Image (cartoon, rainbow, N blue to C red):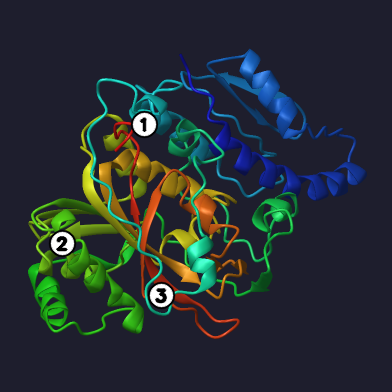
Amino acid sequence: QNLVLIGQAELKLRIILEQATKQASRLQSRSKIRLTMPSSTTLLRKAVRRPGRYYYFSTSRIIVCGVSVMILTSMYLSLSNYNPGILLESAATIKHDFGTLREGFIETWLHNGNNNSAVACTFEPVDVTGDGADEWFRTIKPDLTPNFSLTSAWLKTEASSAMRALDEIPQMYESEFNMGGKIDHLEKSYYDQAYLGKEASLSLWDMNVLAEMLEKASKRQPMKYENDGLKIHDGADKYKSYIEGRRGIVIGSEDPWVEAILLHHGAAKLLTVEFGKIVSEIPQIETMVPKEFTEKFLNNKIQQFDFGVTFSSLEHDGLGRYGDVINPIGDLQSMAKLLSVIKPGGLMFVAVPTGDGYDGLVWNAHRIYGKQRLPKLFAGWKLIDVIGQGSPPKGKFKQHLWVLQNPNGCKVGN
């Protein structure tokens, strides 16, 4: 019954092994200790044969410790800066967070429309051909499904990384980050702004903060991302019936500017999920860090939402800039999880950097989405609209507001 948390552990494992190998060879040349560097595949095979245990490495031998949850990792205690206390804490946390989760559990939430629990959905007409729409906008067709299981997406680690932000892409992940050479544009712009699990930059949201932003929202004044941020107003106007009097979730928000716009347009209740810890004294807004949200949602303490909004957040996921664990598909997994979070037929409003159709990676600042990665980001969703159409000058990017509808859980034929 124990879970093999490969997605979380192997990412840490590979990076630690890569860093430790060079140090191990130097130490070995100066000592009589023979160090064996097993591959992550070897470790995973061993662990699968030994459920209920985790493995860690000292410089001279493998030590096996019995615990109730399997977590796979590798560390040379005298060679790496990995904190063993984090490992022990993670094991206890995972037991609590995922104690009820079983293989295939999440998959059963996304009904194929052939069972009695599917619901009737009304789908919005597709509108990506308005004035200024570029040809590449019209060619975007979301992949039918993500190329990974939703169970693995929900097992994506939400814990903070034990390492500082990396200024270079780890060698073993280069192909995954550049999508096998399909990324058109690669450059560097390094940040180390780790605050996952720490306090957010604005850690207290009170009525005074909200009142100021509500006033700006009522006047449609830009609050963030200049005119790009105003596209949320346009989306809320056009799809008012999905927002007014409804419950929504906001993914990634350091201050309540998105929330103020949504409340101005009549949203009844909002939950904001943000890397940094926020205390909200605003009755209509609840806040959580990702780990807390995942735990409560999987334990059925949070019900599905009518709509969701994420603005300039997903493009950072998995790059390590904000203290998150390096994950080449972190953005894709986070978006796939929302297929479970948004009600069948509900809407998801997504703003990420887009250019003139090219795909880019600015390490470790953000991704730029184009013809290659957008269909993967939107996998499983129905694309119905793009607000703020038209491309920026070549080499630049905008944040268009993409409107997606969740077909999962809808009856076939709707």
Nearer-N-terminus badge (3/1): 1
Along the line of sight, the residue nearer the viewer: 413 or 20: 413
Q: Secondary structure at mark 2?
A: helix
- To which residue does mark 3 refer? 389
The reply to whether residue 322 is visible in this rendering is no
3D distance between C-alphas at marks 2 and 1: 26 Å
The reply to whether residue 140 is visible in this rendering is yes
Disc assigned to residue 220? none
Quarter residue 56 falls in: top right
Quarter residue 294 falls in: top left
- To which residue does mark 2 refer? 240
Nearer-N-terminus badge (2/3): 2
Residue 105 x %, y %: 39, 23
- To which residue does mark 1 refer? 110
Q: Left or right: 33 with respect to 106?
A: right
Q: Amino acid at mark 2?
A: Lys
Q: Amino acid at mark 3?
A: Gln
Residue 132 x %, y %: 42, 79
Q: Image height check: is 50 above or below 342?
A: above
Quarter residue 101 falls in: top left
Observer-side mark, 3 or 1, equals 3
Q: Residue at x 55, y 37 (%)?
A: 148
Q: Left or right: 170 with respect to 272?
A: right
